[in-house]
Image: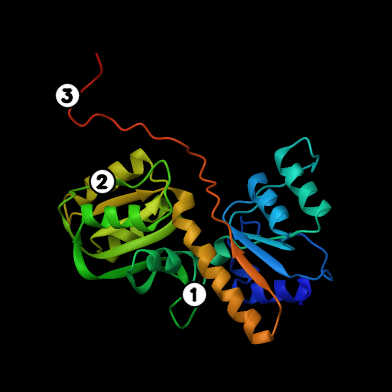
Amino acid sequence: MPRLSEVIAALENLWPAERAESWDAVGTVVGEPDQDVSRVLFAVDPVQEIVDEAVKLGADLLVTHHPLYLRGTTTVAASTFKGRVVHTLIKNDIALHVAHTNADTADPGVSDALAGALDLRVVRPLVPDAGDPAGRRGLGRICELDHPLTVRELAARAAERLPATAQGIRVAGDPEAVVRTVAVSGGSGDSLFDHVRAAGVDAFLTADLRHHPASEFLADRAAHTPLALLDAAHWATEWPWCELAAAQLDEISDRHGWDLRVHVSRTVTDPWTAHAASDPTKTSGAPN
């Protein structure tokens, strides 16, 4: 049975903290380095529901993609929801480790897992890491489809393959346009529009697309090659990484001969819980 420090060293080798963005907060949040680790749980969000799941599972280590404290704090009082998370973890001898933007740009990383879930063939990073001479690390991925799909068919595939959420998949652009190449980026992606434009792909699948950036991007593209946007739920685009990361740790455990059981949370922590679709037969225009 490995010690926490040994497992953390393995995780840091996969996702070195120095490769995280300067604003990010990655690494070990709580945990005793010498404690034994027999069960590990991977999840996207370090929220109370996930921590309670870790307690019920008997996990010794919780690994999440999103940080618990992205900004500084002055309290870990249990009267706050983040403080309650910290108290629950410590009381139950559960360590918390975060891999965020260092997992986004890893090889393989968050966007590789997203591409894999959609059966897309990764060609190269969308935004290459200048510090990677092999040219495999970086933010987002440019992908190819084995067979062309329409935008509508690609959206249907995403809705089927990604975890179900209230949002589903929103589409901007011609639903019948043919897609051969796709850029993907797990999590919020509208800051990458310039790179998507330069890549010359047929579609861009990401999350958290905002009205003005999307509208302006499509208007600009209209004068050039048409491009479709597919907007999925943030949580759904990052959850496949949990399965990838768990498989990576499983492989490390086998290689070291560790008695380690690795689990992936299937608890949906997307904040949106319902969706009311508009009536497509309703006359367009301002409401009465």
Q: Residue at x 42, y 49 (%)?
A: 164
Residue 27: tell me if it is visible. no
- Which disc number belongs to residue 283? 3
**Is residue 68 rendered to the left or right of residue 65?**
right
Disc 3/disc 2 C-alpha distance (Å): 20 Å
Q: Residue at x 32, y 69 (%)?
A: 143
Q: Position of residue 168 (x, y in %)?
A: 36, 45
Q: Which residue is mark 2?
A: 172
The amino acid type, in three-letter code, at marker 2 is Ala
- Which disc number belongs to residue 107? 1
Q: Quadrant of the N terminus?
A: bottom right
The amino acid type, in three-letter code, at marker 3 is Thr
Q: Residue at x 28, y 46 (%)?
A: 171
**Is residue 174 rendered to the left or right of residue 55?**
left
Disc 3/disc 1 C-alpha distance (Å): 48 Å
Q: Element type at marker 2? A: strand
- Front residue of 45 and 54: 54
**Is residue 19 rendered to the left or right of residue 155?**
right
Disc 2/disc 1 C-alpha distance (Å): 30 Å
Residue 186: tell me if it is visible. yes
For the residue carrying disc 3, how many other residues have a C-alpha within 10 Å: few (<14), some (14-19), or many (20+)? few
Q: Position of residue 180 (x, y in %)?
A: 21, 66
Which mark sits nearer the N-terminus, 3 or 2?
2
For the residue carrying disc 1, how many other residues have a C-alpha within 10 Å: few (<14), some (14-19), or many (20+)? some
The amino acid type, in three-letter code, at marker 1 is Asp
Which mark sits nearer the N-terminus, 2 or 1?
1
Residue 142 versus residue 175 in the image, above or below? below
- Front residue of 66 and 272: 272
